[in-house]
Image (cartoon, helix red, strand yellow):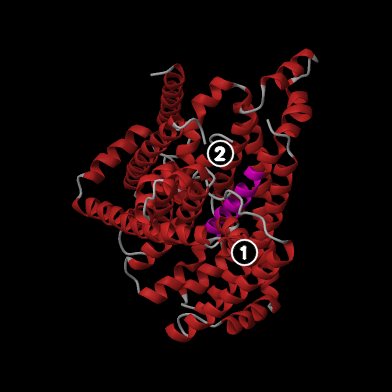
Amino acid sequence: MTRASWIRLAVLGSAVALLEVTCRLGWVSRHAVIAPSEMVRGAWRALGQADVRRDMLLTLSTVAQSFVLAILVGFAIGVALHRMPRLRRALDPFLASYYAVPTFVFYPVFIVLFGLNRWPLVAIGFLFAVVAVAINTLDGLSRVPRAFLRTARAMKLSGAQTLARIVLPAAAPWLFTGAKFAVAYSFIGVIAGEFVQAGAGIGFAIAFAYNSFDSLTMYGLMILLFGIVGTINMTLWSYERRLYARRGGR
Amino acid sequence: MHGAADVEPVVTAEAPPGPRSTALADTTLVIIAFVAIWQLASWIIGRDILPAPVATLRRLGAIMADEDFSRHAWETGRAFGTALVIALLGGLAIGLALGAHRLSGEVAEPILVALYSIPKITLYPVILLLFGLGISAKIAFGVIHGIIPVAIFTMNAVRSLRGVYFRAAKAMRLSPLQTAATIIIPATIPEIVSGFRLGFALTLLGTLIGEMFASQRGIGYMLVKAMETNDVLTVMALALLLITLATIASAILLSLDRKLHKRALPT
């Protein structure tokens, strides 16, 4: 481990210790924040309950569905826009301001449209994620060096061969960036939706625990969720860094 | 611009430029096509589920004419404005400090990235318990969404500055504050504006989400109320309002962003 990682570990460790001490001494109301050791106890207890495990699996599978849909559709949009430069130019300002729009407001419309089941959640996660995939696909495709494509033509590669042997490998880091965002944004969309209106899932379970003043379960579920999402995101992030470093920066 | 894309999916490699007049016409065409698709979808799915554009506009007019609306809008505007100022200034300060001190930056970067990508909505019970119902909870919600991208952008911009700038500051015996104000900020202003653009969008999102949960006033509250009573027309009208405002604001910031990046000297 590098020096920075050690310092980071020390900083995080002392932050947790500080919170523990403040809570134990009663400096913050135990109705607001509970001690980290209590949070871990809550997480452990929650993990032992069958319905919590079911909620977690449900959330994960919803996220997976929205992720897969976002990847497929986003990639298709990216490729299509790459082929149509004029449409791309016209759409460019809208793509660039897409994330300024609180997409979230359409959640109620989806509920009316699909009914109160998992599909509105998939749809909102999808909407959050799909444009990031499309933008990064577009970005990757337009960064494939011209010389590569000329080489493909010189070697008389077919369209499919060019795609598989040249374009996709050259654009791979950007495609990966798109996938990384798709994971993070699917999680954000699905869990936000579960908070607002849903009958199951980990976001719903946290909101439920909050409404019934069960702070042990609430904080337990919260650190479980942050643990899972954080581990997935950070793994993707560090892999991505290596991917770009290998080709000498972005 | 190493690392900026860690948080930024939005700046695309710029599309090849075309003549300005056709670009404007194309954008208009896109808007017309969008409205046409909306109308068509409304016919197919049914007016009760997806209201048509004209009906939505009419409802929006009715909502805006209502005297309650200006109170709600003012409330949202005040919360968003305060949150935006805190997020931008706070993010700038954090980013400058972490960027100028390399080791601190290295220590903090993964933490910032992790914080950026977790679903922060999960923290709403904690925010509510700490701040109580009302405007401060909304502001806090906006700030936790907006401050991190501004900090990451600023940090990466300062990091990629050439060492000669810092050496010059040292030679002129500038204080840290002077160095920031007269050298670092002017040198990194294009990246700072990019960060502000993302910070603006996320602060708006955070403030609205905060209002949906933690408030009895504001546009987010109106949305949630309409949602609970299944009033799709009002939801669509408010969504249209928010989308239009957000897109216009973002377009202004985007053009400023691109202008500054074009003007900036290659480093």
Which residue in the protein does label 2 denote? Answer: B4
Label 2 packing within 10 angstroms: few (<14), some (14-19), many (20+): many
Which residue in the protein does label 1 denote? Answer: A90
Label 1 packing within 10 angstroms: few (<14), some (14-19), many (20+): many
The circle on residue A245 is none
Type of amino acid at the residue the image marks with label 2? Ala
State the residue in front, A213 or A136.
A136
Q: In this rendering, is residue B134 above or below B87?
A: below
Q: Residue at x 70, y 63 (%)?
A: B74
- Element carrying mark 1: helix
Q: In this rendering, is residue B59 above or below A186?
A: below
Quarter the N terminus of chain B occupies: top right
Q: Chain of mark 1?
A: A
Q: Position of residue B29 (x, y in %)?
A: 63, 73
Type of amino acid at the residue the image marks with label 1? Ala
Q: Residue at x 40, y 65 (%)?
A: A123
Quarter the C terminus of chain B occupies: top right
Q: Please give the range of residues in magenta.
A: B194-214
Q: Residue at x 48, y 86 (%)?
A: B43
In terms of secondary structure, what is the magenta stretch mainly?
A: helix
- Residue B201 lies within the magenta run: yes
